[in-house]
Amino acid sequence: MRLVNTTQVPARCFVGPGDGGSRIGLLVAKATFELRCGLTPRLSLARAEPIRAADEETELGCLPADTTPRRAGTFEVVLLGRAHAASGRPAKRVTVALSIGAVRRELVVSGDRAWSHQGVGARPGEPAPVSTVPLIWENAFGGSAQVWLDPERTLEIHHPLNRRGRGFDPTPAMRRIPQELGAAPGYPATRYVRSLPAIEDPATAISSWADAPPPTCWATVPRDIGLATLAARRGGGTAEVAALDRIYDRAHPDWIIDVPDRGAMVHLRGVDPQGDHLFALPEVRVLADYELGQCGEARGTIELAPRMLVLQPERAMLSILYRKCFTFARMGPADARCLRMRVEPGWGRDATVD
């Protein structure tokens, strides 16, 4: 399949075998826009984000692969950035808020804290003032602890949803070790010191030693944490749901939403010391005109559906991923197989079909 693209929106086409001798095509495009306080996002000419076939790690989380499946009819939102205190003045807590249309979520981001003591009656101490905090999974609830079974044997206990995080309590799991794995007298033992997460959902913020909220972070969900379990919590918990979510979802479940309406307003707060970002979701329709057959007699247009929004305020950009799966009959080497990309103002009209 020959792809002709003279637009400012990078695109790639992938073709593979289908059922009954047919072929399956995947067309992916990504529009990149400048993101600056007080300005309408403009399509970027100089810094267009490429189509990624694999995750790309950054200091603020990974930029997700664009070629892996996405669930039809849904829209994923990812934020790779830092919480910033207003005007750069250190604060004990910063509220990060994002709304897209009628959907609104908040995070409370704190400076370093310590427990008053351990066990029943322990309470989180006051946060240290901070001016900026990375919004990464390492700062969300979770964590890992190295545990000794005897002077020679160790194992890692980690939070089932977020092994990268901090603040979980390994004690309940350690209590089960003597029965399940055996341990020498005086063991299991650990040097792990329980801390507190920097990023929380204000509705489930930790207030006592027994609290164990679901991890909350809006960066891309890493492949090495409990994505399937996290998603299954929202989807009913069946094995089938968990397996599908492991393949598809890269955003936190709070930000796997219906495709926004055309012109939906976006309000992003707490990620830029200069102020809030308030703008209408950029309207770009991405289409491909096709010609198939010996003389190009099969002609038409397919429209790509918006599937993911990646916000990168630290880089002053946002990108929207568009995708379309399609099938076509197997053809001979002399047959025409051409896709010509074009863009126009508007929003994806077939957003419920992938």
Image (cartoon, helix red, strand yellow):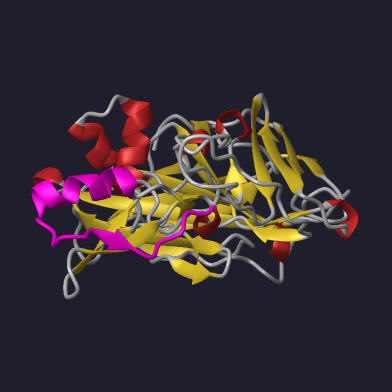
Residue 21 in view in this figure: no
Q: Is residue 118 left or right of 311 when viewed as pictured?
A: left
Q: Position of residue 353 (x, y in %)?
A: 40, 32
Name above or below for residue 48 compared with residue 220.
below
In the rendered image, the residue lying farthest to the bottom is 152
Q: Nearer the viewer, residue 139 or 17?
A: 139
User: Which sits in the foreground, 73 or 206?
Assistant: 206
Residue at 49% across / 63% down in the picture? 62
- Residue at image point 10% right, 49% down: 180
Please check the rendered image and state whether residue 172 is part of the magenta-colored stretch, yes or no: yes
Residue 211 part of the magenta-drawn span: no
- Name the side, left or right, on which 168 lies relative to 1: right
User: Within the image, what quadrant is residue 77 found in?
Assistant: top right
> How many labels were placed on the picture?
0
At x 54%, y 47%, the residue is 117
Residue 85 visible in the displayed image = yes
Horizontal and vertical percent position of residue 303: 49, 41
Q: Nearer the viewer, residue 192 or 119?
A: 119
Is residue 300 or residue 246 the one in the foreground?
Answer: 246
User: Residue sitting at 48 percent across and 64 percent down?
Assistant: 51
Query: Which quadrant of the rendered structure holds the N terminus?
Result: bottom left
**In the picture provided, is 58 more to the left or to the right than 54?**
right
Q: Quadrant of residue 268?
A: top right
Figure quadrant of the C terminus: top left
Residue 332 x, y percent position in the rendering: 19, 61
Could you tell me residue 154's position as x and y percent?
21, 68
Look at the image and give the residue range highlighted in magenta.
Answer: 171-195
